Image: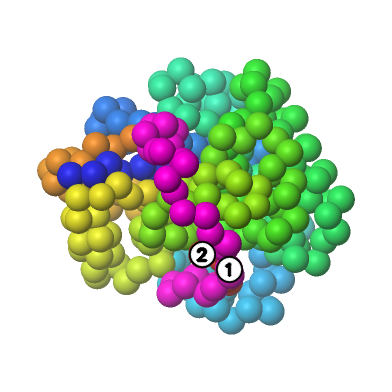
Amino acid sequence: MGRLGLKIDVDTHRGMKNGVPRLLRVLKDFSVRGTFFLSIGPDNSGRAVLQLLKNPLFLKKMLKTRAPGLYGWKTALYGTLLPAPMIALSFPALVRQILDEGHEVQFHAWDHRRWQDDLPKKPEQWIEKEFAKGVCGFEKLTGRKPTAFGAPSWLIDDRVLRIAGKYPFEYLSCTRAKTPFVHVSPGLPELPSDLPCFEELDRQNDLATITGLMNDGHDHILPVHAEVEGGIFEERFRRLLKDALRMGMGITALNDLKNSLNTDRLPRRKYRMDLLPGRHSPCAV
C-alpha cells in the first residue's frame, strides 16, 4: 500500500487554540506525523459575513457544515465587532510543541481571510507584503525560514507563484490534483491535496468515499483543518486513520513524500482554476 500524507491547515485563532492540541493528541495516539501549515497573523474571520451576502454557495457550505459548531460564534465576529487576534503568533509555546513532537511546520498565510476574499483584486505589492509579513512571523516562531507554502483555500495566480519562487521553498502544496507535478513557473514541485475534505462530502458516506479513494496502492494527501478534524469531526478523523493503518498505509508528513520524489521525472504542468464539488469558490487544480 501507499502512504497517506496529512496536510493540516490552521486557519483561525480557535483552530490554533483548541483544534491543534486535539489533533496533536490524535496523532500521538496513532504514533503518526503530519504537516501543519500555519496562518501566522490576524484572524479576520468575521469578514466572511460579506461572502454570505455575495456567494450563495458559501452560505450553503456554512449551513451544511454547521459552521457555528466548527468555528464558534466568537470567530464569526473577529475583525468586525471584535478585534482580530493573531493566530500562530498568539501561541509560540504551541508551535514549539508541534515541532518538539516531530511534526513538520510550514507557512500557510499571514491573513487567511483577506487572501481568500481579496487576492484577485489586490496589487502584486500586497501579495509581496503578505509573504514578507508571514515569513517574518514564521521565523520569529520557529527560528528558521519555511521550506514550503500552502496557499489558503488553494487560491493562487501567476503573481503568487512568481513571488513564491523568490523564497527558499522546497515544495508547494497549493492545488487539488491527482498526482505530484512541477509548476511550469517557478519550477517548484507541487504536492497537491488529491483527497476531498470531510466537509465537502455527505456525512453519510464521507468515510467510505475517502477510504475507497485511498485503496489503490498509491500515495495520497488528505487535506485536514484544525477547526474541523480538531473539532466536531475528530472521531471521524480517528476512524479514517484507523482505516488507513488497517489497509497497510503509512501515515506521514508531506516532507517525507517530497523527499521520496524524483522531481526530474515529474511532469511539468500549468494550474487552472475550477469549482470542485462541495467547494464554494474555485481553487487551483
Mark 2, other Cα within 10 Å: few <14 / some 14–19 / many ≥20: many
The amino acid on which the numbered mark 2 sits, given as a three-letter code, is Val
Q: Residue furthest front?
A: 264
Which disc number belongs to residue 210?
none
Which residue is rendered at x = 25% and y = 65% of the image? 209
Q: Is residue 276 magenta?
A: yes
Name the colour scheme.
rainbow
Going from N to C along the chain, the mark reached first, 2 or 1, is: 1
Determine whether label 2 and label 1 are within 8 Å by CB. Answer: yes
**Cα–Cα gap, marks 2 and 1:** 6 Å
The quadrant of the image that shows the N terminus is: top left
Residue 19 percent across, percent down from the top left: 46, 41
Residue 147 percent across, percent down from the top left: 59, 32
Q: Choose top left, top right, bottom left or bottom right for residue 73.
A: bottom right
Which disc number belongs to residue 285?
2
Residue 223 percent across, percent down from the top left: 42, 51
Query: Which residue is more in the foreground, 14 or 182?
Result: 182
Callout 1 secondary element: loop
Which residue is rendered at x = 75% and y = 56% of the image? 159
- Horizontal side, residue 131 vs residue 199: left or right: right
- Horizontal side, residue 60 vs residue 143: left or right: left
Which disc number belongs to residue 272?
1
Magenta-tinted stretch: 254-280
Which residue is rendered at x = 43% and y = 27% of the image? 103
Using the rendered image of the protein, determine whether residue 179 is visible from the camera's viewpoint: yes
Q: Is residue 186 magenta?
A: no
